[in-house]
Image (spheres, helix red, strand yellow):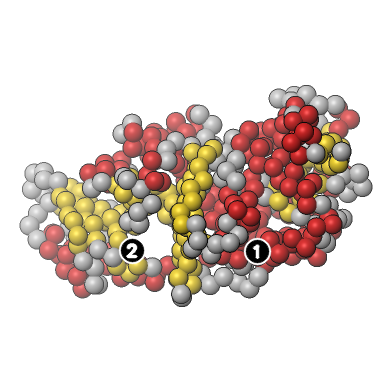
Amino acid sequence: MQTVRVGLLGLGQIGSGVYSILTRKVRELEAQCGVRFEIKKVAVKNPGKKRSVKLPRKLLTANAFAVVRDPEVDVVVELIGGVREARLYVKEALRRGKHVVTANKALLAEYGDEIFELACQRKCWVQFEASVGGGIPVIKALREGLVANRIDSIHSIINGTSNYILTRMSENQMDFKEALAQAQAKGYAEADPRLDIEGIDAQHKLAILLRFAFGGRVKFDQIDCEGISRIRSEDIAFAEEFGYRIKLLAIAKRSDDGIEARVQPTLLPKEHILASVNGSFNAVLLRGDEVGDVLLYGRGAGSRPTASAVVSDLVDIAKRGSGRFADAALMMRAVRSSLKIKSTSSILSRYYLRFHVTDRPGVLSQISKILGDHAISISDCVQKIRSEGSVVPLIVLTHAAHESDVRDAIRLIDRLKSIRGKSQVIRIESGAA
């Protein structure tokens, strides 16, 4: 029976979940995988703190370097979050020839180049299934199950907090602030929810997916990112009226002139398979040239689903072992030449535009003229009638137009005397799936 000695960094929700699985399911893991996991050390900020799992006091240390430098530790599991300290511990573990498992998407999105390169130099594994999609095995699918495919596109819902908020806004007619407060009350959103609602968490995750779907380096700040904080209940209602639902999507598409990569609120047709992904659930829709569409769906966060992915990574490392590092080509996909990310201004898309206008004659013709001058054709238009002179919403759906033209037109429209407030711009994805 093979024994793998594990050092844990962090014993929060995910770390406690990992500890619980490894200690509760010893026999199951031995029977299914032929591996026995032994937890040697656990680094925590406060060893005296009361915890949800009971473990021997001798395992605990406040010194994370005592874990990564311990010669009896084979694999370091980094679950402390953040970037600065995690980067130090992960690199030190790799320098000492230890394999690493991490759920840290920000770390890999921002410093993946140096971490993957160091791992290859030291002939160590870095496993990170839990960093994207929680318990959904999307990394394993890209690295193994879909290896015969050229991945042509990714359409994904990979932030459960934003998806929960948009679901509540849609199903319960809540405004954004009310839905956010409910998400915080249920523990789906942090007290400071900026990483989730501004799309940054999804941006980090998409940067990781891009490496393994398209095979190359990518800087996460090359990915255009827009969150959901400007989505209003009226946008949800108008989208429904036109037959759409609004989702925060992380999108990547391959084309001859580069890769389109963006995180953005998006109008999806109600019949699209991702339009029915609700609550805190995640889903990743991959399109391969051989297999066609593949949907991976499940809990994108939470201690148990994420801990499940971490344990899966530990089993993978145990099975591969140091002697099979010829498989490192899988990891080298992440550090090849840089991917060419297309400029957002070149993207061609349909658009949902919402203006708040003074209800008086000639307003629509002014807006239509500016759009027409920028080669933007209107497909649908709705204006709610109130008393003349009042401020009303005017909704315009466009045919396909270039992002740069739309942005230039909106800048001019927002200067009109009849416009009140900043206009809303949301892209529309029409592809059936």
Query: Would you say 197 lies left or right of 62 here?
Result: left
Q: Report if residue 222 is visible in the image.
A: yes
Q: Residue at x 38, y 34 (%)?
A: 168
Residue type at the position of mark 2: Ser
Picture quarter with the N terminus: top right
* Nearest to the observer: residue 393 or residue 337: 337
Q: Can you say whether 89 is above or below 276 in the image?
A: below
Q: Position of residue 397 (x, y in %)?
A: 23, 57
Query: Would you say 3 lies left or right of 300 here?
Result: right
Q: Report if residue 219 is visible in the image.
A: no
> Could you tell me which secondary element the residue under label 2 belongs to?
strand
**Residue 48 occupies quadrant:** top right
Residue type at the position of mark 1: Ala
Q: Give the residue number, with chain letter if any, for mark 2.
A: 349
The 10 Å Cα crowd at callout 1, few under 14, some 14 to 19, many 20 or more, is: many
The 10 Å Cα crowd at callout 2, few under 14, some 14 to 19, many 20 or more, is: some
> Could you tell me which secondary element the residue under label 1 belongs to?
helix
The Cα–Cα distance between marks 2 and 1, rounded to whole angstroms, is 29 Å
Q: Can you say whether 124 is above or below 233 in the image?
A: below
Q: Residue at x 33, y 63 (%)?
A: 349
Q: Give the residue number, with chain letter if any, for mark 1.
A: 334
Q: Residue at x 74, y 60 (%)?
A: 327
Q: Position of residue 312 (x, y in %)?
A: 69, 42
